[in-house]
Image (cartoon, rainbow, N blue to C red):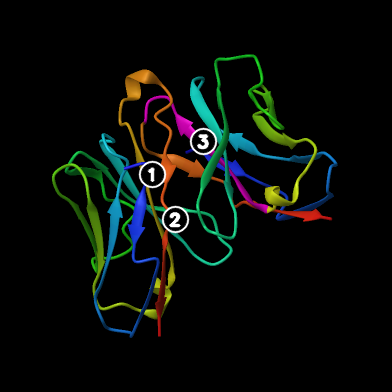
Amino acid sequence: AQTVTQSQPEMSVQEAETVTLSCTYDTSESDYYLFWYKQPPSRQMILVIRQEAYKQQNATENRFSVNFQKAAKSFSLKISDSQLGDAAMYFCAYRSADSNYQLIWGAGTKLIIKP
Amino acid sequence: GAGVSQSPSNKVTEKGKDVELRCDPISGHTALYWYRQSLGQGLEFLIYFQGNSAPDKSGLPSDRFSAERTGGSVSTLTIQRTQQEDSAVYLCASSSGMLAVGWDTQYFGPGTRLTVL
């Protein structure tokens, strides 16, 4: 069975600095999708960025980028130029390419932005 | 609609009462999901619908929990004889359900915070 591990329960960063949130996963599959979701205090789970396992190129969305290391089964999220609005819980999730519903979730990392 | 909506936003109930939580998915999305999130925890999968059918109910924690979906749209999660351990945020998500296009990303509603006294 697949598992997703986020080893940092909490991270803090100074506003305008860069922070990296880690995520590792365990799978025997070769084709899958990886996601980072953000959950601010409003509770709304918001998709931040996603990556297809068969793509070598790391996904980028404005200030958010990933470092996808397939062999190491690592999928870290880098937030550049951190802003106060980035403060939230960040969840990493895995989905098999064969399944359209079974998202496997990490436990989350709480990101604190210091002004 | 523009996004996934859920109602009520907050629900406080007494132990032993029944509650119904509603989810209205994005228009055209055939797949719908219910999750439970306890305080400070990750998401726990409850049930998945494809159209009106629920191929996977394995996450429902007990027979007090049930869900239905009608017309391939609105879904209701019902918890009978609520217990204090049912207190949590219940999140609903929907997706296009079209696995062939690859992503089938799940989009979430704002959740219902259930408090059982």
Q: Is residue B16 left or right of residue A105?
A: left
Residue type beneath disc 1: Gly
Q: Nearer the viewer, residue B40 or A1?
A: B40
Q: Is residue A54 above or below residue B71?
A: above
Q: Position of residue B6 (x, y in %)?
A: 35, 57
Q: Quadrant of residue B41?
A: bottom right
Work out whether mark 1 precedes mark 2 in sequence or the reverse, and give the earlier one. Answer: 1
Residue position marked by numbered label 3 in the rendering: A94
Task: Check disc 3: other Cα within 10 Å, few if <14, some if 14-19, many if 20+.
Answer: many
From this view, report whether residue B55 is shown above or below residue B17: above
- For discs 3 and 2, the disc positioned in front in the rendered view: 2
Distance from the alpha carbon under mark 3 to that under mark 2? 21 Å
Q: Are marks 1 and 3 in contact (CB under 8 Å)?
A: no
Q: Which residues are magenta?
A: A88-99
Q: Which mark is residue B110?
A: 2
Q: Are marks 3 and 2 on the same chain?
A: no
**What percent of the width, then of the height, locates residue B51?**
19, 38
Q: Chain for mark 2? A: B
Element marked by disc 1:
loop
Q: CA distance from mark 1 to mark 2?
A: 10 Å
Q: Can you tell which mark lies on residue B3?
A: 1
Q: Is residue A89 magenta?
A: yes
Do discs 1 and 3 belong to a common subunit? no
Q: Determine the residue positioned at 34% across, 24% down.
A: B99
Calculate the distance from the C-alpha at mark 1 to the C-alpha at mark 3: 23 Å
Q: Is residue A92 visible?
A: yes
Secondary structure, mark 3, is: strand
Q: Are marks 1 and 2 in contact (CB under 8 Å)?
A: no
Viewer-side label of 1, 2: 1
Residue B55 got which mark? none
Q: Are marks 3 and 2 in contact (CB under 8 Å)?
A: no
Q: Point out residue B46 in the picture as x, y percentages from the top left corner.
A: 35, 54
